Image (tube, rainbow, N blue to C red):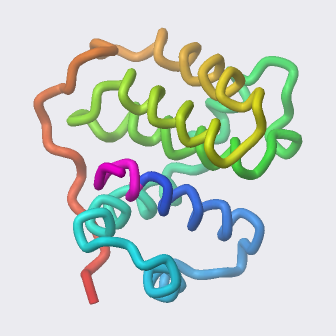
Amino acid sequence: MGVRREGREAAIQFLYQRDLNPTSELADLQVFYKMRGLSPAARRFTDALIPGVLATQNAIDALIKEHAENYELHRISAVDRNILRLAIYEMLHCPGVPPVVSINEAIEIAKKYSTDESGKFVNGVLDRIRLKLARPAREAAGIEPPKSPIENS
């Protein structure tokens, strides 16, 4: 498994955990890392994703509500909801990652961790959002992904 895939999967697992237990704190991330056994490179990537998703979650959730036709946010499975959150964050705030890469990664993770239909659902929602992006779908914007705001322990 690639470093970024490992980091994305870990980020989704932490976001899922936090979604089900909203009183948990970002400090719990260090405990999660110890339990998960994440490689240092994947951890650095995850450290850049999780705080960004959490900081922009309200705006991301609004996009999900707008583009998930006939679905209310709370009726989307927690796994799919957090896969969507992460992919949308990458599409909007990680210009070094082409949107189609974020979409493809989200689809593969949905197939691995969710239902048989989740890959199609995730693809549909993310593709609707991708069509409204003001950047090329298959190219990175030439800017590095965000740096981790979390200090490594």
Q: Main secondary structure of the magenta part?
A: helix
Establish if 103 lies above or below 30: above
**Residue 126 locus on image (x, y percent):** 56, 23
Report the side of 66 relative to 30 (left or right).
right
Picture quadrant of residue 152: bottom left
Nearest to the observer: residue 52 or residue 31: 31
Residue 66 placement, left or right of 36: right
Q: Kindly indicate the quadrant of the structure image that contains residue 76.
A: top right
Q: Is residue 14 above or below residue 23?
A: above
For the C terminus, the image quarter is bottom left
Let me know if residue 72 is in the magenta part.
no
Q: Residue at x 22, y 19 (%)?
A: 139
Furthest-left residue in this view: 142
Q: Could you tell me which residue is drawn at 87 percent across and 20 percent down?
A: 70
Percent coordinates x, y for residue 113 in the rendering: 66, 48
Q: Which residues are magenta?
A: 1-7
123 is higher (above) or lower (below) than 30: above
- Say which residue appears at 21% left-offset and 36% top-offset: 96
Assess whether residue 2 is covered by the magenta stretch: yes
Query: Residue 47 at what x, y percent from top left?
Result: 34, 66
* Image side of residue 74 versus residue 56, left or right: right
* Number of disc labels: 0
Percent position of residue 74, x then y: 85, 45
Task: Say which of 94 and 42 sits in front.
Answer: 42
Q: Quadrant of residue 140?
A: top left
Residue at figure coordinates x 64%, y 36% from the top left: 111
Q: Is residue 74 visible?
A: yes
Whether residue 59 is visible, yes or no, is no
